[in-house]
Image: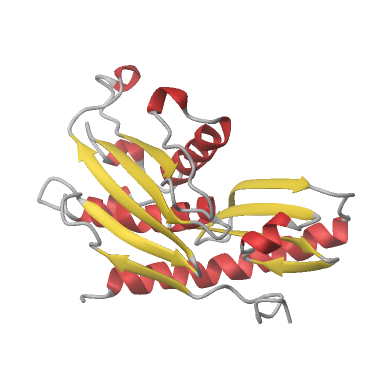
Amino acid sequence: MRKNGRKPDELRNISITKDYISHPEGSVLVEFGNTKVICNATIENNVPRFLKGKNMGWVTAEYGMLPRSTNERMRREAKMKQSGRTMEIQRLIGRSLRSSVNLDKLGDRSITIDCDVIQADGGTRTASITGGFVALCLALRNQDSDDFSSTDAIKSFTGSVSLGKVDGEIVLDLDYEEDSNAETDMNFIMNDEGNFIEIQGTAEEGSFSQNELNEMVALATQGIKDIIAIQKKTLNSYE
């Protein structure tokens, strides 16, 4: 058992609340344990300059942590003065969510997923990807018409989870304390076909073996399968 009482292969309690904010085309509050992120999807009828005239859409993301999302207040980041970490995470979210969409089915639409961390306890990027996908689906559903099908636009479900080696043991879905003390830290993004979209991995202390990597892959695969089941249940709920 881990310090938080979970088994090594056990996810934190995960919940996704639909329509959390009333104004965006799609919105959710996603919670991975004590990590809470608001994900809002906005659709605009225009595309970046490099896509003009190509009848293709675009998906991008922005990410930020609110000043008291952590134990101590951090400064609010201005868009032109974002940290390297913030830019890296929002690019990861954008790449991951673009991979889940048939861009040629969007028409001249751009979708921006805003991921705002209101409380951080590890895994904010993986929670943002998981919740951001549901917000994206909700936004596309709101566009359904005789000329547009959200079902055609979604290529695959996409989920994400963190894991790592803590005290010599491979564990799933790290909270902040575990992440801070991990010998190895990994983030996996996968689709509902079991295929990888992106893997991030760092040996914070020492190294990890091929067998440990295989164990992490197996654990992430099952964890994301469970996460995608939660996404599907949320989207199929009429509450």
Q: Height in image: 84 above or below 227?
A: above
Q: Residue at x 34, y 44 (%)?
A: 113
Give percent across and percent down for residue 190.
55, 55
Can residue 235 be seen from the camera position used here?
yes
Q: Quadrant of residue 179?
A: bottom right
Q: Is residue 87 left or right of residue 153?
A: right
* Residue located 62% across and 54% down the image: 188
Q: How many marks?
A: 0
Where is residue 8 shown, x and y percent of the image? 71, 75
Residue 130 in the image: state x and y as whole percent: 45, 58
Quadrant housing residue 94: top left
Left or right, 11 with reference to 80: right
- 17 to 196, vertically: above or below: below
Q: Which residue appears farthest toward the left when viewing the image?
A: 146
Q: Is residue 3 left or right of residue 189?
A: right
> What is the x, y in percent for residue 217?
71, 61
- Which color mode does the image show? secondary structure
- Quick one: 202 or 234, which is closer to the camera? 202
Residue closer to the observer: 138 or 84: 84
In-front residue for pair 52/94: 94
Viewer-nearest residue: 54 or 225 = 225
Q: Quadrant of the N terminus?
A: bottom right
Above-or-below relation of 219 to 4: above
The structure residue drawn at horizontal position 21% and vertical position 75%, both measured from the top left corner, is: 238
What quarter of the picture does the C terminus occupy? bottom left
Is residue 133 visible in the rendered image? The answer is no
Residue at image location 17% in from the left, 32% down from the top: 45
